[in-house]
Image (tube, rainbow, N blue to C red):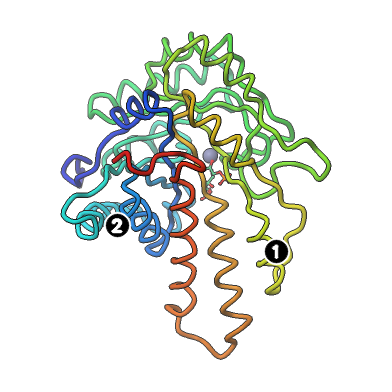
Amino acid sequence: MAVSYKDLGLVNSEEMFSKAVDGGYAIPGFNFNNMEQLQAIIQACTESRSPVILQVSKGAREYANQTLLRYLAQGAVEYSKEIGGGKNVPIVLHLDHGDSFETCVSCIEYGFSSVMIDGSHFSYEENIALTKKVVDYAHKYEVTVEGELGVLAGVEDEVSAEHHTYTRPEEVEDFVKRTGVDSLAISIGTSHGAYKFKPGQKAEIRLDILREIEKRIPRFPIVMHGSSSVPQDLIAKINRFGGKMEEAIGISEAQIREASKSAVCKVNIDSDGRLAMTAAIREVFATKPSEFDPRKYLGPARNALKELYKHKVSDEVLGSAGKA
Ligand code: G3H
Ligand code: 13P
Ligand code: ZN
C-alpha cells in the first residue's frame, strides 16, 4: 500500500540543503541496514541536534526488506522525538544509488522523501533523459532528487571503474537545467569503500574542480559520495583483534571540512561506520570469547558507531551539529 513520506513525519531535502549551503556546513548521508545502525544514527544526530539523511542502498533493501525499512524510518522519527525532549530532528529517507526509474517509483510509494537516480554510467544524453524522467515523477509527490555526473573509481552500483572520470564543470549547468534535479553528486577523487588511494599516492581530492563547478552553478546543492576517512586507529584495532586490513586510506577530514564549507551540502559516509562496528565487535570476540549474547557485541558496536557519528557532525568535519 502506497504511503506518503509526510505521513511518516519525514521531510524532503529542500530546506535542509538551502540552509546548509547558506550556513557553510553539510548534512550527513549515513547508510543503514539494521536497527543498531539506525539507533546509532538517530541517537548521535538527536543528541547533537543535527539534521540527517538516512540512506538506503539497493543492497540494504535486499538485506533488510523494504517494508521493514519503511517502519524503521517511521520509528526513527518517533524515537528522535522521544529522546529529543519531544522534538525530533529533521529526517530524510533517501534512496542511495537508485539504478532505475522503477526502483525510484517503488521507493517513493514506500515513503521515501528523496531518491538518487544514478545515471552516471550512461552516456550524457541518456543520463539526462533518465534523470529527468525520475524528477518529473518525483516532483509530483514533492520528493527531491539527486543526480550524478562523473564516475567514481572503484565499484559503484555493481559497475566497476578503474579510474575516476571527474565531473566536467562545463556540463553541470546544462545538466541541472535540463533535468530539474534538486542536488548533484560529483566525482572529484572520492571513491567508495576503505581503499580509496594506493599506498604512496597523494591522498587528496580535487577541490579545484569543486570550485570550478561552484562557479558555474553558484549555491546549487552539491553531494560528495565516498567520503569516509578510514580512521587509522580503527584499522589498527581491527588488525589487533584478528582482522586483516592493510593500507586502507580514506579522505582527510580536513578536506571534507573544507568542502562542507562550500556548496557541498551532503556528504555520504558508510565505510567508516562499518569499520567502527567491526572493530568493536572484534574486540568483544577476542577479549570475551565465551560471550554469545548478540546484545553484548552489537551494543558496544552501536556505541562506537554513535561516537563516530557525533564526531562526523561536529564542527571538526561536517558542522551540522546544532543546526536542527
Ligand atoms: O554507495 C555505497 C554504500 O556504501 C552502500 O553500500 O551497496 O554495500 O549497501 P552497499
Ligand atoms: P564510503 O564508502 O566512503 O563511506 O561512501 C559511502 C557512499 O558514498 C554511499 O553512497
Ligand atoms: Zn555512494
Of the pair 214 and 320, the residue shown nearer to us? 320
Give the percent coordinates (x, y) of residue 67: 30, 55
Give the residue at x 31% y 47%.
49
Query: Mark 2: which secondary structure?
Result: helix
Give the residue at x 47% y 72%.
300
Give the residue at x 42% y 47%.
56
Q: Is residue 137 above or below residue 11?
A: above
Residue type of the residue flagged with mark 1: Ala
Q: Which residue is mark 2?
A: 72
Q: Is residue 1 above or below residue 162?
A: below
Q: Which residue is mark 1?
A: 236
Seen as rendered, the residue at the extreme right is 200
Q: Is mark 1 within 8 Å of ligand 2?
A: no
Q: Is residue 308 above or below residue 261?
A: below
Disc on res. 177: none
Between circles 1 and 2, the one closer to the viewer is 1
- Picture quarter containing residue 121? top right
Of the pair 130 and 314, the residue shown nearer to us? 314
Query: Mark 1: which secondary structure?
Result: helix
- Is 194 on the left or on the right of 6, as rendered? right
Give the percent coordinates (x, y) of residue 186: 55, 26
